[in-house]
Image (spheres, grey):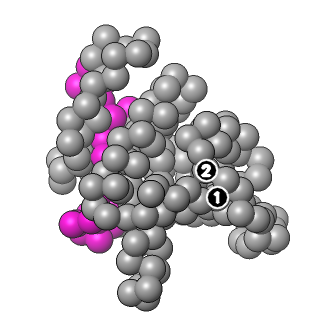
Amino acid sequence: MSMMNRNSDFDHFFVRSANPQDLEAVLRIYNEGIADRIATLETEIKDLFYMQRWFEDHKGRYGVLIAEHENEIVGWASLNRYSQRCAYDGVAELSVYVSRDYRGKGVGSFLLSALEQLARKEDFYKIVLFTFPFNTAGRRLYQKFGYREVGTFEKQGILDGKPIDVTIMEKLLS
């Protein structure tokens, strides 16, 4: 999958499928998300070995997309297995991470659009996601794309010693 964003501030902005050579940049961006405490309950910085194992789990239908600007990886998104139960094979969970320097510049929108195209191609009928209620930028992005809030798990996890609520959102693709 290769796409160019023609409606942004970027001269050359592409989304493509990830390959193993991208993992160091994916790791850097993911670790920024972990450190910033706005997108994941993960608290421990990850290493390249972790990302290599993670990437192996994203073969086939569960793809990883890369956003590039002038040959620099500025974001990534993935379709993740929602459940091991076969009844949920048509449902994917998503992840979207954008480099600190590119947040708020349309990268997330472009990745989300491409990720939905990939999900349809791979015969998913629904995408779900989990976000923090205080991640207003993320929630706005998902709402702009037609995701609806299903509910909130209260005190779903612990982040920096404090209980954190997690909001569930979904979108039917068909």
The residue that label 1 is drawn on is: 169
Which x, y percent locates residue 125?
Answer: 43, 64
Instruction: Give how far apart the Cα atoms at labels 2 and 1 are.
Output: 6 Å
Residue 104, image quadrant: top right
Taking the magenta stretch, the answer to whether it contains residue 63 is yes
At 43% from the left and 16% from the top, the residue drawn is 8
Q: Is residue 58 above or below residue 13?
A: below
Which x, y percent locates residue 43?
Answer: 60, 61
Taking the magenta stretch, the answer to whether it contains residue 77 is no
The residue that label 2 is drawn on is: 147
The secondary element bearing badge 1 is classed as: strand
Amino acid on which disc 2 is placed: Tyr
Horizontally, residue 84 falls left or right of residue 69, namely right
Horizontally, residue 79 falls left or right of residue 94, namely left
Mark 2 neighbour class, 10 Å CA radius: few under 14, some 14 to 19, many 20 or more: some
**Marks 2,1: beta carbons within 8 A:** yes
Q: Earlier in the sequence, mark 2 or mark 1?
A: 2
Q: Is residue 30 above or below residue 57?
A: above
| Residue stretch in magenta | 51-74
Q: Quadrant of the N terminus?
A: top left
At 76% from the left and 65% from the top, the residue drawn is 151
Mark 1 neighbour class, 10 Å CA radius: few under 14, some 14 to 19, many 20 or more: many
The secondary element bearing badge 2 is classed as: loop
Which x, y percent locates residue 71?
Answer: 23, 25
Which x, y percent locates residue 170?
Answer: 59, 59
Please tell me the numbered disc located at residue 103.
none
